[in-house]
Amino acid sequence: MKKLLIISLFFMSFCGFAQDDELPIQKDTVRRSLRGKVSTLPKAAHNMYKIFSLEKDTVFVDTSLTIKSDYKFNYLRKDNFGVLPFNNDGQTYNTLDFGLNRFDVRPNFGFKAKYFNYYTVEDMKYYSVATPLTELYFKTTLEQGQSVDAFITLNTSKNLNMSIGYKGLRSLGKYINSLSSNGNFIFTTSYSTTSKRYVANLHFAGQDFLNNENGGLQNKADFESGDPEFQQRSRLEVNFDDASSIFKSKRYFVDHTFRINKNDLANTVLLDHQFNYETKSYDFRMTTETEKFGDAYVSSNYSDYTKSNDMYNRLGATFSNSTIGKFNVFIENYQYNYFYDRYSLSDDQVVIPNSIHNNLNAFGGKYFYDKNKIKGYGLFSKAISNQTFSKLELFARYEFDDKNSFTAMYQNLSKVPDLNYILYQSDFINYNWYNSFKNEKINNLKVSAKTQWLTVEVQLTTLNDHLYFSNDDVTGEKILVTPKQYGETINYFSVKAQKEFKFGKFAIDNTFLFQQTEQEAAILNVPKFVTRNTLYYTDKLFKKALFLQTGFTFQYFSKYNANAYNPLISEFYVQDTEKIGDFPLIDFFVNARVRQTRIFLKAEHLNSSFTGNKFYSAPNYPYKDFVIRFGLVWNFFQ
């Protein structure tokens, strides 16, 4: 990944001069040549820098400084309300808002604690820009490291765009054996013919996430005592001082369409094809002996290595008619191979296989509706292979005007279990299993209203045959986690509300989440209340050359039995012996914008020294202490 970073930086410096400079004239904008003279060619208009997703949702490049910019200035580069980071950047997050979970009917690799900074196919962005666009992100880390995110995109012509980016992090952390060293390398290409008859988007993503795993604190009393001796966190004893885990992935993706008819755009037939090939691996290693995970086949040098590869193809046809609307029919093929390099024996001498593989086929259709102020779609797909699954999704959006809209989405899913629930092999005896679970059944309804007065989102989810991990050790001294399936129904309900009030140059932004579950056993545990409130001041200084933003952010979530973290399998598991929460998190920030540069200075968790040392991200894993950090986001329009 270090070599890829060097290549990407070289590419950025070289490609800045490769852009087609034929632009329409815009008023009050000029471009300066390399010699500093005023050129007759103007800068491009703001709406000529487009960012779009695979679903063709389009936004424009935004260089403004708002309170949302502050919320997104973090390692994930997105608003992290509802997730709680661990004490070092690049580690995992505990999920406070269950509504953030995505549902996919196909089997996933597993090891979900590694996925918070993982770029999925749906996360990828494609571009169309008038001139080369570069964005640089930098933020200081907690100890001995740096966090950077850099990319450049350019159109070699109106029809062809390329982008290349690298997001890298290295942070030693304050605690023993808590190093994070992560990298995301991304390359994308978008192409279309002049008539838009053929359109293609493709990308390559190479990602790796290395974390030293200390297993949490050995003695919480030392941390909570407030003893000055332990204010230097490296003096606190942890469970593991030489364990590590690394997750790697490479993905090759193509999505392209071809329009059959040349001229009649009101009545069209499109052929579409999507291809995705992805390899993944997860490796846990530890050299010294431990009894934390129970008995083992070896006394030291533990190594659990899991691999998978999968290939997905979808072939479809879209029919568009001015009378009946637009609908798409498709067939899907998904092949996966999940495997180990060894066989294993269970306690009763049953052979545990070293792989599972399957070839899944499905068919489906999608109808699009777009008339007047109503937009929506209906999607249905069903397996026609030996492993069944199905998906029904309905979505509708009604726009009253620019400030008021209403959306609703319903999902009915029969989901194939994730692969690490089915099969896992380990040097630790308890972590060897081969299961046959039922499909998870998920009914999910989400309704939201965005108005000029308030933004509200309501979610109701029903889970049947829900899969989860739990600890089988009754003493609580060991982590003997196994996968289980809950035979009863779990009902989840949530209401999330957001509103910003402005009073001249002052403003207060509020986000509030209420959650409730109904279940026979405590399987799905969430905090009942989660809130974030930001009071801030904005002004323009130095003859309006600098835009200033400063204030305080208060965060809080109620006490609950949070899921605990298992570093061996990078999964969270259900526990009912320890509660976390009911502590405030207060940040102070000073942000500024000078032209296309946004500068951020933040004092994070400034109340940690006087509100008690009982702040945890997960049982036995402390949240970070007070720290002052700074950074910037800088856009270049060449």
Image (cartoon, rainbow, N blue to C red):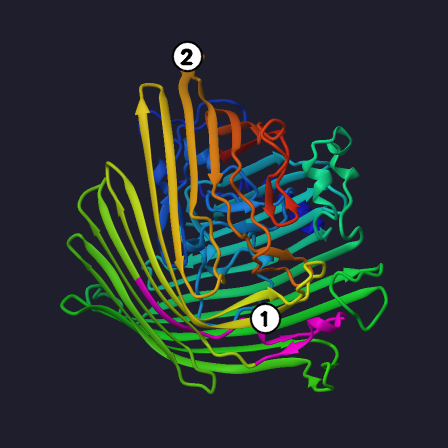
Query: Which residue is nearer to you in this view: 96 or 331?
Result: 96
The amino acid type, in three-letter code, at marker 2 is Lys
Instruction: Please give left or right for residue 130 compared with residue 608 in the image.
Output: left
> Was residue 419 drawn as part of the magenta stretch in this picture?
yes
Task: Say which of 582 and 603 sits in front.
Answer: 582
Q: Amino acid at mark 1?
A: Pro
* Magenta residues (range): 410-435
Where is 343 relative to 522, above or below?
below
Q: Is residue 3 left or right of residue 464?
A: right
Q: Nearest the camera: 494 or 388? A: 494
- What whole-number distance in Å separates the C-alpha atoms at marks 1 and 2? 62 Å
Q: Which quadrant holds residue 436?
A: bottom right
Q: Residue at x 58, y 42 (%)?
A: 149
Tag of residue 495 = none
Q: Which residue is mark 1?
A: 483
- Binning the other alpha carbons within 10 Å of mark 2 as few (below 14), some (14 to 19) or many (20 upward) gives few
User: Which residue is tagged 2?
Assistant: 543
Is residue 563 positioned above or below 27 on the image? Answer: below
Badge 2 element: loop
Residue 304, by quadrant, is: bottom right
Q: Is residue 522 magenta?
A: no
Q: Residue at x 40, y 85 (%)?
A: 384
**Percent of width and height locating residue 428:** 75, 70
Percent coordinates x, y for residue 628 in the rendering: 62, 28
Instruction: State left or right for residue 383 relative to residue 337.
Output: left
| Label located before the other in sequence (1 or 2) | 1
Residue 76: where, in percent of width, then height?
54, 45
Who's the residue at 56% across and 51% down the image?
117
Residue 185 image point, x, y percent: 60, 52
